[in-house]
Image (cartoon, rainbow, N blue to C red):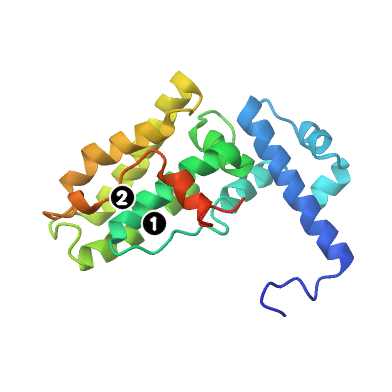
Amino acid sequence: MTHDGRAERTPQQERSIRTRSRILECAATLFDRHGYPMTTVGDIAKEAEVTRGALYYHFRDKQAVAAAIFEEQFEGMSVPPQHLRVQELVDATYLLVYGLRINPIQRGAARLTMEQGTDRVDRTRVMQMWIDFVVSILSEAQKQGEVRPEVDVNRASRYFVAAFAGVQNMSQAFTKRHDLDEYLTDMWQYTLPAIVSDGVMAKIMLDPERGAQLARHGIALAS
């Protein structure tokens, strides 16, 4: 297999991959627009311009579509390396916020994550994936002396994921996420000083425009 994995794909395989991606993007758009309970398999098939049979070829049911959207939001996530590992965590959240503006998968995943109901969608797994992601960065930051040694990295990570979910809810309620960058900047401004070592906070770049700036330099979440 070549580096990008595409040379050995047959035309049929390429079509199948494109169809699956289209189904996920259309489903994510509908979930974001109408919510999971109000979106049917028929709605997704119609939006994606595929038959129900084609949809069921890729996904056994609507719940499987939602699970795939959760997985897809992590695909290709790339955070530029920085001298400070804490900066990488901050940058990851700014890039995610930027992705929520332009990426239907990110928007759909966000709506699915925040939506609480009686459906069978497993939200705990995606929450844990985000917690694990934060833990991995903060653990390295603590080893480098950026995070205070007494900080419980696991509990801090759990809190940051919960706080980020909260600012998303607030911004969505007031401005449809148009000012989420500002909410995020405030979140880091008021929470990071509690865990970072002396002198680190002054070196961290917090800017509502940072996500767009990073994306313009070719570093972005998968689209």
Residue in the foreground of this view, choosing between 163 and 223:
223
| Residue located at (43% from left, 61% from top) | 80
| Residue located at (70% from left, 38% from top) | 27
**Amino acid type at image mark 2:** Ser
Helix, strand or loop at mark 1 = helix
Q: Is residue 39 left or right of residue 96?
A: right
Neighbor class of circle 2 (other Cα within 10 Å; few <14, some 14-19, many 20+) is: many
**Amino acid type at image mark 1:** Asp
Helix, strand or loop at mark 2 = helix
Q: Residue furthest bottom?
A: 1
Q: Is residue 32 left or right of residue 128?
A: right
How far is the residue under mark 1 from the one under mark 2? Answer: 8 Å
| Residue located at (46% from left, 52% from top) | 214
Residue in the foreground of this view, choosing between 56 and 34:
34
Figure quadrant of the N terminus: bottom right
Check whether the beta carbons of the residues at disc 1 and disc 2 lie within 8 A of each other: yes
Picture coordinates of residue 35 (x, y %)? 62, 28
Q: Give the number of the disc on residue 157.
A: 2
Q: Residue furthest top?
A: 174
In the rendered view, tell whether residue 97 sits above or below residue 183: below
Picture coordinates of residue 13 (x, y %)? 83, 64
Picture coordinates of residue 144 (x, y %)? 21, 67
Sequence-first disc among 1 and 2: 1
In the rendered view, tell whether residue 109 sits above or below residue 59: above
Neighbor class of circle 1 (other Cα within 10 Å; few <14, some 14-19, many 20+) is: some
| Image-quadrant location for residue 79 | bottom left
Q: Is residue 96 left or right of residue 192?
A: right
Q: Check disc 1 and report the residue beneath it.
A: 132
